[in-house]
Image (tube, rainbow, N blue to C red):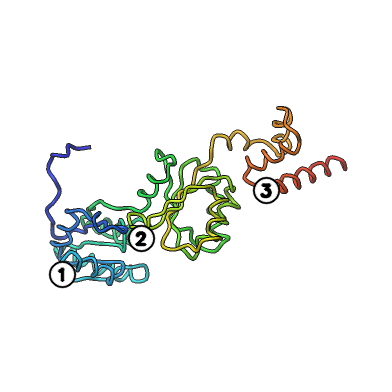
Amino acid sequence: MSDISGPEKNRVLGGTLYLVSTPIGNMGDLSARAIKVLTEVDFVAAEDTRNGMKLLSLLGISKPMLSYFEHNRAQRGAQIVDRLRQGQSCALITDAGTPAVSDPGEDLVKLCIREGVPVTAVPGCCAAVNALVLSGMDTRRFLFEGFLEGTDRNRRETLEGLLSCKRTMIFYEAPHRLQNTLLLMREVLGGERSVALCREMTKLNEEILRCTLDEACLHCAQNQPRGEYVLIVEGKSEKDDFFSHMTVEEHMKFYTDGGMSRMDAMKAVAKDRGVGKSEIYKQLTRSEGNSSHS
């Protein structure tokens, strides 16, 4: 990392795309450099021009604005690059946070790089990182997944692919899909898995709920989800690894050999595997039934 007192990249240059991070809720988080860039660029590309204009109006800035979002990114991206080639400068902003993170701005960055157009970033707020550091979970290694896309089957397959992931996982979710997503996570990852539900971050009603997936499902059943959420999910633990190579029978024997009753061992195995005790009972009954017929 360079010395904080060293030269700064403050000059706004023509022909350059600026990725400008905007507040995720608290206007006080907008940096002085972001304001300078928004003031000096030739035009601004925004995910939603209404929100973009509101932001600029609060700052007393008036700039030509273009919409750039999921459904017009191919056509509008080419138009933005053409203007950049002509020597104009552009600031790309999203509704909140860092452009190109789980955002169509990613495509514009790729297009600019492919066409040899300079791209630079004005760092600032990012909901994913903000939630991660508030979660209390391991921040040394993490995996950003963003929104789980597709049908429930696609979403389940994505989660199944993450079952053995040891890194802390970050997801985005809309309020109307939150409960369904948590139920799916509980089913695939296990109800004892830790999760942090983060909403309204940096705002007056900021809420960080740190609990298990079982508790999160119950909370959402009793409380109507409001606002956009960031979900921080615990990675697979070393304890899970210890039992992962065992069959249910071997897992049971591990506990009963240690002096546990069959009933207590069944509860422990169910907890380790993140399933209900009835599921362990079914598997043991099936296995014992097969043994008696062999």
Q: Residue at x 45, y 59 (%)?
A: 173
- Counting residues from the start of the chain, the first of labels 2 and 1 encountered is 1
Q: Residue 293 location, x and y as percent?
A: 88, 43
- Residue 184, image x and y in percent? 57, 56
Q: Nearer the viewer, mark 1 or mark 3?
A: 3
Q: Nearer the viewer, mark 2 or mark 1?
A: 1
Q: Quadrant of residue 94?
A: bottom left
Could you say where residue 26 lies in the image, as x and y percent from the top left? 28, 57
Q: Is residue 92 above or below residue 236?
A: below
How packed mark 3 is, by other alpha carbons closer than 10 Å (few <14, some 14-19, many 20 or more), is some
Nearest the eye: 29 or 160: 29
Residue receiving disc 2: 103
Inter-mark Cα distance, 1 to 3: 59 Å
Which residue was labeled with disc 1? 62
Asked if one can make out residue 147 in the rendered structure from this viewpoint, the answer is yes
Amino acid residing under circle 3: Gly
Disc 2 and disc 1 in contact, CB within 8 angstroms = no
The picture places residue 55, in percent across and down from the top left corner, at 23, 65
Q: Nearer the viewer, residue 89 or 143?
A: 143
Mark 2 → mark 3, Cα distance in angstroms:
38 Å
Give amino acid for label 1.
Answer: Ser
Q: Which disc number belongs to residue 276?
A: 3
Q: Residues within 10 Å of mark 1 (few under 14, many from 20)?
A: few
The residue depicted at 28 percent of the width and 72 percent of the height is 50
Point out the tag, 2 or 3, that comes first from the N-terminus.
2
Q: Which secondary structure lies at badge 2?
A: loop
